Amino acid sequence: MSSLDGTIVNVPLPVIQADLHFSQASLTWVINGFLITFGSFLLLAGRLGDLIGRKPVFLAGLILFTVASVLCDLAQDPILLVAARVVQGIGGAVSSSVIVAIIVTKFAEPVARARAMSTYVFTAVGGGSVGLLLGGVLTQSVQWHWIFFINLPLACWPPFWGGR
């Protein structure tokens, strides 16, 4: 979800600018707010995962990211959208920082670990590519708010919570 949201907002930026009356200078914060907080909180969140446990940190990040996505979806002014994107970046960093450690500890067998890491990397890289396409499709077919709504079904998907 983090890699998807890193790019999904790029295509509908002109529509967001017109709809929420962003200035050109402040529009960059829709992207930068997410990226700066994401990069800034990765190490801190990884250390937090070492101290209190990786799964609780992952789930906390997932919840924070999802709540922020809902706030982005409901945003009717520029300040709320940028603030929600900042929180989304923090949630993305918190959940992403512990994923590799979870994979390494859950898959002890080298072949299974390699398969899990390959799946993770494919998903992370693919999310960025799919985000650009999906951002355009959702903006053209529905409206730009749906680029953030897409995170809700993903966050409610049972494998994220330890289910099947």
Image (cartoon, rainbow, N blue to C red):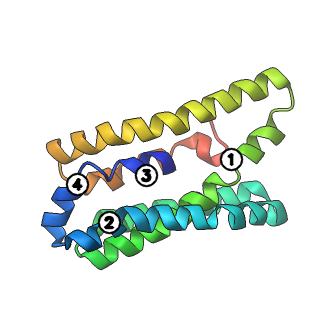
The residue at the point 62 percent across, 66 percent down is 41
Report which residue position mark 3 lands on. 6
- Mark 2 is surrounded, within 10 Å at the Cα level, by few (under 14), some (14 to 19) or many (20 or more) other residues, namely some
- Mark 4 is surrounded, within 10 Å at the Cα level, by few (under 14), some (14 to 19) or many (20 or more) other residues, namely many
**Amino acid type shown at disc 1:** Ile
On the picture, is 95 further left or further right than 88? right
First-in-chain label (3 vs 2): 3
Of circles 1 and 2, which is in front?
A: 2
Q: Residue furthest bottom?
A: 79
**Amino acid type shown at disc 4:** Trp
Report which residue position mark 2 lands on. 28
Residue 134 position, x and y percent, is 30, 40
Of circles 4 and 2, which is in front?
A: 2
Residue 64 position, x and y percent, is 53, 65
Secondary element at tag 2 = helix
**Amino acid type shown at disc 2:** Thr
C-alpha gap between disc 1 and disc 2? 28 Å
- Mark 1 is surrounded, within 10 Å at the Cα level, by few (under 14), some (14 to 19) or many (20 or more) other residues, namely some
Secondary element at tag 3 = helix
Of circles 3 and 1, which is in front?
A: 3
First-in-chain label (3 vs 1): 3
Q: Residue furthest front?
A: 25
